[in-house]
């Protein structure tokens, strides 16, 4: 499929399944072409076909976003092949249901790299171009878990809170540039691997954020498009 260079471009991370997939499809219906990032190339190739059916060109990059060099290559490839980035949706994240005191440091570090450092780095990599053009939008998917009472999610909650803080701080720094940043904070997401793996075998019942209700991936995707259009500082999503 050849790309129509008049179409705006959106990056979606964690696009191989669940809400990342839904967000990419929703943006395609809004007229965006997509640059997709995750590790599972095959799943993104499936999505690429669905995006083509919506009339959207997409670029698939299998990338481990915990790796600083891979992030640089991914954004450079997007800019080289698609010309610009109008929207960055930082969606990819992982969590572990383990007490901080019992956690392997490698796991803590992995969550910090993917959930906080990667969105900050990707923002840094696309912002120069956005500010030069005087337009662009970054949407950071965080979680309502930042403010809920959840046991054994200390690292995850810390990374999500950090992302929320980064969103607010960067938003004020960017005032007047034409570029803005918004956080979307869902409660539980319908049938994602994340929630399942959290409860699997842990013996810990998730309360708090998940008890606030399960939000469908479609609703989250619709709200991502709504905040792109309405430019809110933050959007909390509960069922
Ligand atoms: N699940 C919930 O109930 C819930 C609630 C509130 C907020 N959220 C937020 O919603 C977002 C998505 O959550 P989800 O439940 O949709 O997660 P998910 O189903 O586990 O999907 C995570 C995505 O991230 C990608 N990913 C994981 N590790 C990666 C890595 N090292 N490099 C690149 N990509 C990687 C995965 O693809 P690959 O495995 O192919 O790499 C997948 O596409 C997160 O920001 C999360 O904080 C989730």
Image (cartoon, rainbow, N blue to C red):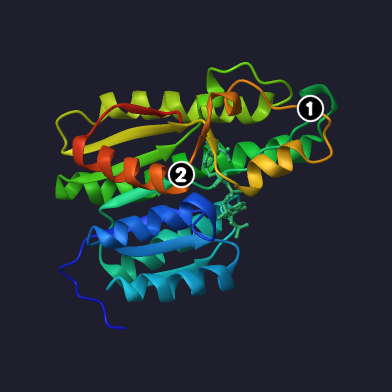
The picture quadrant where one finds residue 127 is top left
Queried on whether the Cβ of the residue with tag 2 lies below 8 angstroms from ligand 1, the answer reads no
Q: What's the residue at 57%, 18% (across, down)? A: 148
The picture quadrant where one finds residue 54 is bottom left
Q: Which residue is the site of mark 1?
A: 204
Would residue 219 be found to the left or right of residue 82 on screen? right
- Name the spot of residue 68 as percent of width and height, x first: 55, 51
Pick the front one: 148 or 156: 148
SS assignment at label 1 = loop
Q: Is residue 238 above or below residue 137?
A: above
Mark 2 vs mark 1: give the one in front: 1
> Along the polypeptide, which appears first: circle 2 or circle 1?
2
Would residue 47 be found to the left or right of residue 190 on screen? left
Count of numbered labels shown in the rendering: 2
Q: Is residue 15 above or below residue 165?
A: below
Q: Which residue is the site of mark 2?
A: 121
SS assignment at label 2 = helix
Q: What's the residue at 54%, 58% (across, down)? A: 17
Q: What's the residue at 33%, 45% (across, down)? A: 222
- Name the spot of residue 197 as percent of width and height, x first: 72, 43
Q: What's the residue at 41%, 42% (across, down)? A: 220
């Amino acid at each position: 499929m050849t790309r129509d260079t008049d179409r705006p471009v959106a990056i979606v991370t964690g696009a191989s399944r669940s809400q990342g997939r839904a967000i990419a499809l929703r943006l395609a219906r809004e007229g965006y072409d997509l640059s997709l990032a995750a590790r599972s190339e095959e799943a993104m190739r499936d999505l690429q076909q669905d995006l083509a059916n919506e009339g959207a060109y997409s670029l698939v990059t299998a990338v481990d976003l915990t790796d600083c060099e891979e992030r640089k290559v991914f954004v450079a490839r997007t800019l080289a092949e698609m010309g610009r980035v109008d929207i960055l949706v930082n969606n990819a994240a992982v969590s572990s249901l383990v007490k901080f005191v019992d956690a392997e440091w490698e796991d803590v570090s992995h969550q910090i790299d993917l959930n906080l450092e990667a969105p900050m780095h990707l923002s840094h990599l696309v912002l120069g171009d956005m500010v030069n053009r005087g337009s662009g939008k970054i949407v950071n998917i965080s979680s309502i878990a930042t403010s809920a009472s959840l046991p054994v999610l200390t690292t995850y909650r810390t990374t999500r809170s950090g992302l929320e803080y980064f969103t607010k701080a960067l938003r004020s720094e960017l005032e007047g540039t034409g570029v803005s940043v918004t956080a979307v904070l869902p409660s539980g997401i319908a049938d994602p691997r994340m929630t399942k793996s959290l409860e699997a075998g842990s013996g810990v019942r998730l309360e708090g954020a998940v008890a606030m209700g399960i939000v469908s991936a479609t609703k989250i995707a619709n709200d991502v498009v709504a905040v792109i259009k309405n430019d809110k500082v933050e959007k909390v999503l509960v069922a």
